Image (tube, coloured by chain):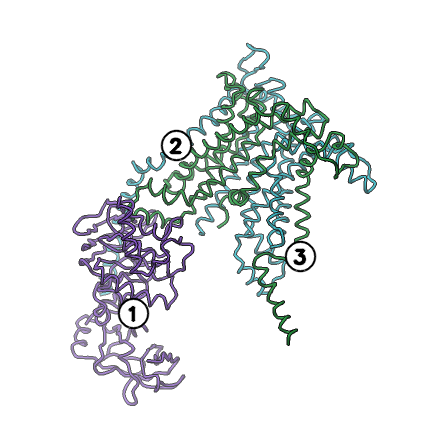
Chain colours: A purple, B cyan, C green
Amino acid sequence: MASIQYKKASCIYPGSDKLAVDSLSLDIQDGEFVVLVGPSGSGKSTALRMLAGLEDIDEGHIEIGGKDMVGVPSKDRDIAMVFQNYALYPNKTVAENMGFALKLRGVSAEERRKKVEDAAKILDLTEFLDRKPAKLSGGQRQRVAMGRAIVREPQVFCMDEPLSNLDAKLRVQTRTQIAALQRRLGTTTVYVTHDQVEAMTMGDRVAVLRFGKLQQFASPNDLYDKPANAFVAGFIGSPAMNLVTVPVTENGVKIGDGTMELERADLTKISDAGLNEVTIGIRPEVLEISDSVGVDVVVDLVEDLGSEAFVYTHAGSGVELVARCNPRTAPNLADSVKLRRHPDGTVHLFHPKTGERLN
Amino acid sequence: MTVTADTDAAASEEAVAERVRKIREAQDVGVSRAEGWRRRLPLLPALIFMIVVTQIPFLFTLYYSTLSWNLVRPGSRKFVGLNNYIAVAKDSQFWRVGLNTVVLIVVVVLVSAFLGLLIALLLDRAFLGRGVVRTLLITPFLITPVAAALVWKTTLLDASNGIFNWVLSLVGAGPVDWIGKFPLTMVMVVLIWQWTPFMMLLILAGLQSMPRDILEAGRVDGAGAFQLFRELTLAHLRRFIELGVVLGAIYLVNTFDAIYMMTQGGPGIASANLPFYIYQRAFLGFDMGQAAAMGVVVVIFTMIIASFALRLIFKSFTGKEEAA
Amino acid sequence: MTTTAEKSTEATAPAVASKKKSRKFSPWGLVAWLVGLGFFFPVFWMVLTAFKSEGDAATNPPKLFFTPTLDQFKAVFEQGIGPAMLNSIFATGISTILVLLLGVPAAFALSLRPVRKTQDGLFFFMSTKMLPIVAAILPLYVIVSNIGMLDNIWSLVILYTSMNLPIAVWMMRSFFLEVPGELLEAASLDGASLMRSVREVILPLVSPGIAATALICVIFAWNEFFFAVNLTAVNAQTMPVYLVGFIAGEGQYWAVLSAAATITALPVILCGWFAQNKLVRGLSFGAIK
């Protein structure tokens, strides 16, 4: 168990011109479950691999438990990693796979067996201990990969998209198991995924990356309620937040053919920044269908999920808006309805060019 | 506003490029020092061994080729410069034999590749006893070449009691002196017999590595069997056929056993190839200088062709690695 | 009712059977059999003739049925095939071991830990194979004779090693390349040094490939004739050379010649048959993916 600090760490792949990870700085507490999330190419896997020692730290530092890891090889870092494709040793049984690290450290066969059996019990692998990976299903292999990491009782767990090769149902199931396991063991964990749902449900704090740069590092709630820029706003939450760049008027902004009013404080911020256009962000659940006031829109598609429904619409001038509504009272295709902002709902304002948060 | 944003962007781009440059410099230096040598170390024993055993003798060959030297007349060694080469150039037998060599390589490689393709196609579908048939088919490749040549020469091709002539007699055709009348051709037949399995195995590997869904997509799109073969299968197989052709050619340059056993190069030099001819010069005629010069000429020609071949193998293989 | 039920089970049964082995009679299968038998025929005939008496061997028309005899084999052994056999085993075995000892580290260096000059190293290895051996035989003969190693089996051992090393490195490199990089990373995170990773993770995975490579080396070394005939005389002659010498003595006696040929060729043929899958794997040079 240890704290982890990324201090302006950067990495370039040999032969490439681009910084895969650009000056990443993160302060991770001991015992925390941190998720690195972002689209492909965002550098999240690279950042994880830098921590594990599988990629060089080309600039800056990474510290584990206060010790600088620059120049320290993987085998000396006391980190366990769960790979996306599991990387199980094909010629060893499940028990041997899980016990390999201990064997290398010279742990006695007795103790090895006990530790392996304990971990196998937690992960429900006891009946598979003598099988080889080829004879296991995908889900079982994934658990063996986890088991291999747990047995080592390392300072840090690294997990590189461990759920992406599982089918949807198994993914949800395993997600909760991993989170529960980590809470029970208390080991500092860095977890990489491209799936923002995983990020939001599993992490104590989540770091959103894009093109190698950190966008925001905060708790899931903070990311959801106060995204630091338009990218984070649009990345977190499904369906995505409505983000439209619209002209500013006296009292608010012009959406489609109508106007949406804004708070005084927000309008001040916009004029302080000297903008006549602003990107506003409104979550679908903040928009509701109204009879009276609102923006005129035409319904393009209704997604009925049973517990809620999402209405995809477009306003004049091509602006597209998604709103949440009750599935029993959802409008029909091609209906003309009005959308208005829920009076208590938050409107996020971003700079139209830089994407930075304004309010 | 827009102005500062742009210049800001430009300035930071430069800063980024500078950092990238610094890092790349450090990377380049980092790997090539001690780590680089440590990584090369396992390669060294094999490398040194090969250089000593193959390259150094060749240097000697170059040296010998400038001498007039006959092994049975010791003390006759003297430097004659390029005289041997001139003699080789004037030696019409040498060029005749060279032509034989080229004909032999080209015909054997092409015919065995073609036959190998046909047989691979046959073996690609499952049928009863496919494994046994494959076992039967690889046997010609396994059998000792001199033993094979012996069997062909005696029991199969013999003018009086060979099986070929017996089969001919069943349809009333006269006995043929196969080896006497068609020496080079018969050598080529034996070589084709031995090399077709090799080509077949390579191409079969290619066929079995081909993803089937492309063929299914083609069929759904309306392509007939022959079109599927020509457009999709053949394109995929090209890499394997090329590899087979190149490797086969490399080995066939050195063909010696079959000629030694079946025809001794004869009649005259009708079925001799360059290795055999040089062998005769060196070990039967004991004319080292001439033989060496011939050897060098052969190497030069082979290197020209080999450089194309190596580029071909590497292109198709690194291409595969990139694609994968 | 019963007829339709029977029909439906008939319909499903072949579908299940074809998953295991195709018992369907297919015309192309027949053609394949004919081709296979045709290619195999000379070998079959060689072995058959080895069991004939001389009278039965060179007849017109050729005899398929006869009383078999082991006399020919006895004659071959009596003429002293033992030393040649031992020489072949020695040269083939030792050279293959040397090839593996030199080639496995080389292939490893060229695949798993590439440096900038990797392509050049590989290029060099392959290019040595392309050198016509006839160009090297002259100085080799002179050198070997000068150091007194003519007719010494060790000369062949060295030469066979150099003959097989390029192909072996090429093949083994392709097998090394198939090891997923992630496995090495996992091993290094588990705390394994490079040597340990190689021993516990890589070698087990690569061992079928190494076996295939060894088999190919055995085939080429055992069957080799050119070096053997020029650099050996009586003491160090290998089986192929012995066979040729045998002909000089026995000329037209086909049966005993066939026996000698069979004994010469059989070991490698059997090896190849039993390790067939490895052989096919090796020959495809990892070109399959």
- Quadrant in which residue C205 is drawn: top left
Residue B238 placed where, x, y %? 56, 49
Label 3 and label 2 in one chain: no
Label 1 and label 3 in one chain: no
Kind of element beneath mark 1: helix
Label 3 Cα neighbours within 10 Å, binned few <14 / some 14-19 / many ≥20: some
Question: Which of the chains bears the disc numbered 2?
Answer: B
Query: Could you tell me the amino acid type at mark 3?
Result: Ser
Measure the C-alpha gap from mark 3 to mark 2.
54 Å
Q: Residue at x 54, y 13 (%)?
A: B78
Residue C69 visible in image: yes
Q: Residue at x 31, y 60 (%)?
A: A123
Residue C280 placed where, x, y %? 54, 44
Seen from this angle, which residue lies furthest right?
Answer: B172
Kind of element beneath mark 2: helix
Q: Badge 2 is on which residue?
A: B44
Query: Could you tell me the amino acid type at mark 2?
Result: Leu
Question: Which of the chains bears the disc numbered 3?
Answer: C
Which of pointers 3 and 2 indicates the residue nearer the eye? 3
Q: Badge 1 is on which residue?
A: A234
Residue A107 placed where, x, y %? 26, 46
Kind of element beneath mark 3: loop
- Quadrant in which residue C63 is drawn: top right
- Quadrant in which residue C238 is drawn: top right
Q: Residue at x 20, y 51 (%)?
A: A64
Residue A151 placed where, x, y %? 27, 53
Report the disc number at residue C26.
3
Q: Is residue B41 above or below residue B56?
A: below
Measure the C-alpha gap from mark 2 to mark 1.
56 Å
Which of pointers 1 and 3 indicates the residue nearer the eye? 3
